[in-house]
Amino acid sequence: MAQRGAGVALDSSELAGRVGGAVAGSEARPFATPGSAAIEVAPASIEAVLRYLRDDLGFDLYVDVTAVDYEALRGTIEVLYVVRSLSDAAQAVVKVAIDARDPHLPTVTGLFDGANWAEREVFDMFGVRFDGHPDLRRILMYPEFEGHPLRKSYAYQHRQPLTPERDPIADPWPRRHPIPQPSQK
Amino acid sequence: MNGENAEKKEQTLADPLSEVMELQMGPSHPACHGTIKFNLKLDGENIMVLDTEVGYLHRGFEKMVEQGTWTQAIPYTDRLNYASPLINNFIFCEAVERLCDITVPERASYLRVILSECSRIADHLTCLGMGATELGAFSAGFYMNEARELLYNLNSRVTGARVTVSYGRVGGLARDVPDDFEDMVREAIRKTEAVLSDSEKLLERNRIFTDRMVGIGIMSQETAKSFGITGPMLRATGIAYDVRKAAPYMFYDRFDFEVPVGTKGDNFDRFAVRFEEVKQSIRIIDQALKQLPQGPVVVDNPLYVLPDKKDVYGNIEGLMNHFKIVIEGIRVPAGEIYFAGEGANGELGFYVVSDGSGRPYRVRVRPPCFYGMASLETMAKGHMVSDLVAIFGMVNMIGGECDR
């Protein structure tokens, strides 16, 4: 926070310079979007970049993770991270472009709790796998759903096959947690 | 007694406290407004694990918006949050207008502020009323519903619909408000104030109500920031962050209002912050009505705004302009923007990507209550099942917004 100086909003190129200098291998470069300081970084460095933004530049409020499918245009999916500084309302957008044929990148759930559900949604909607995510399963769609609906290759009229009824006893809701032991009474 | 029966007896006599009970609450549960499922693991009556399942109301908002023109996206935004559809309309339009680099006329902006604040009141009343009803305080709930009805009637007079308003347009508003708009708003506000003071007396020092609210579902500032909690829930933890103050849009910088904050971040703080915000919204409406200028309510720009009917029927240029906008849609310049405004539940953001054609390339809604629901397990762990209802009520999940 002290490095940035209160009330001084960074512009995109300044932010790219800071991030590029502080995080090795981030290859940060600015891009234009109104109202935000925006940079594009290398996928492998995303966690380090967001950690630097949060801890050193004061972007302490997690806002959002989402994605845009550019497979037909550039063969990539862009994953976008939005963070904000509560002290001066400055907003930063960090973008990574990953290969649309095998989309995966490191998770940031270790930094922001809110990223857990958001990354699940990006996985659900775009098929992007987040390496190291503790609980990567569909969130808005049902488990039997085939495909990833927000990909441009998924036609909006596309029908899904009927799925047989699930037996809640034989096939219960995902047991992601070890069964906890009750406290001794 | 043979062996089989002995085993059976042992099972029935097993101490219920020695095992973890699995309970599924929902997706349609009378104590929860909204379609949501809680998969619980309980130790007696205390929550050990809560797995929240959302998505029951998923209608593919983001996919459907990509299929139509920019203007056709506006009716979809109504259907995100039924309690404050106008706020969704306006924030979406503000996002697109920033991409188009157009500034709406003063009157349109003032009307957006007034109607947004009316919607915020309606949304808070929904949350407070439903929350109180779920804890058994039916009278307070019905009082608040009555006040909300006044504001829905106002919606109906101004936009022609109570909930599915579709009143915002890129560049301004669909049409001007009726002549007696100011009187209607003042009347609705006057009655709302009366209802508020009644409900406040019913709830604020009601022992049964406060026992269920104070100290329940505490959230720390650090957790809130990490989860992306915004709006009344963030302010209840003591952080005075409101998009209207921190990064003013529309004309929020021209009004004098305060950002109420809580101290502990518990359920009661969330309740009290919303209550106080209703009063602040009334202050804003009062000032905005006094300053409301005359003038047009849409920008004078044929690229984005439909021509007058007089021109459509009177000359060929008007007719062609009308057809181009209706059939091809407005052309939003290529670019991308994340724009957020203060929705009633928190920061309502739109990540909008345009490729320069007449259709949105991508519209992402950042729903405030989605992250509220994500944090539900943190808040509810260790509390009893009955407290989950109270905590859930103060998150104010709106299914349409959370599941899109």
Image (spheres, coloured by chain):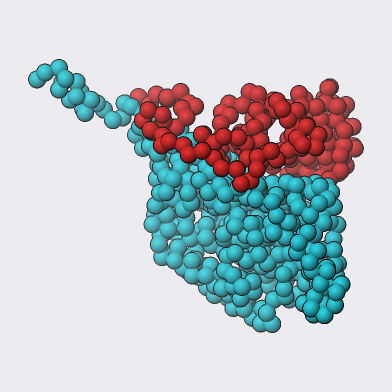
Direction bottom: furthest residue: B179
In the rendering, at what x and y percent does residue B75 appear?
A: 65, 60
The spot of residue B352 in percent (x, y) is 75, 48
Above-or-below relation of B29 to B2: below
Instruction: Say whether residue B363 is left or right of residue B145.
Output: right
Residue drawn at x 69%, y 46% is B364
Residue sitting at x 38%, y 37%: B23
| Residue A54 percent across, percent down from the top left | 74, 34
Examine the rendered structure and indicate whether residue A135 appears above or below residue B210: above
In which quadrant of the rendered view does residue B372 lie?
Answer: top right
State how many labels appear.
0
Q: Position of residue B344 (x, y in %)?
A: 62, 56
Q: Nearer the viewer, residue B369 or B384?
A: B369
Q: Is residue B167 visible?
A: yes
Closest to the observer, B299 or B13: B299
Q: Which chain is cyan in the rendering?
A: B
Residue located at (90% from left, 37% from top) = A13
Q: Which residue extends farthest left?
A: B1
In this orientation, does residue A46 appear?
Answer: no
Q: Is residue A36 above or below residue B144?
A: above
Using the image as rendered, state which of residue B69 and residue B240 is in the foreground. Answer: B69
Considering depth in this image, is B22 or A56 the residue closer to the camera?
B22
Residue that protrudes farthest toward the top in the picture: B3
Question: Residue B119, located in which quarter of the rendered image?
Answer: bottom right
- Chain shown red: that is A
Which residue corresponds to the image point at 31% horizontal and 26% vertical from the top-left? Answer: B18
Query: Image height check: is A137 above or below B302?
Result: above
Quadrant the N terminus of chain B occupies: top left
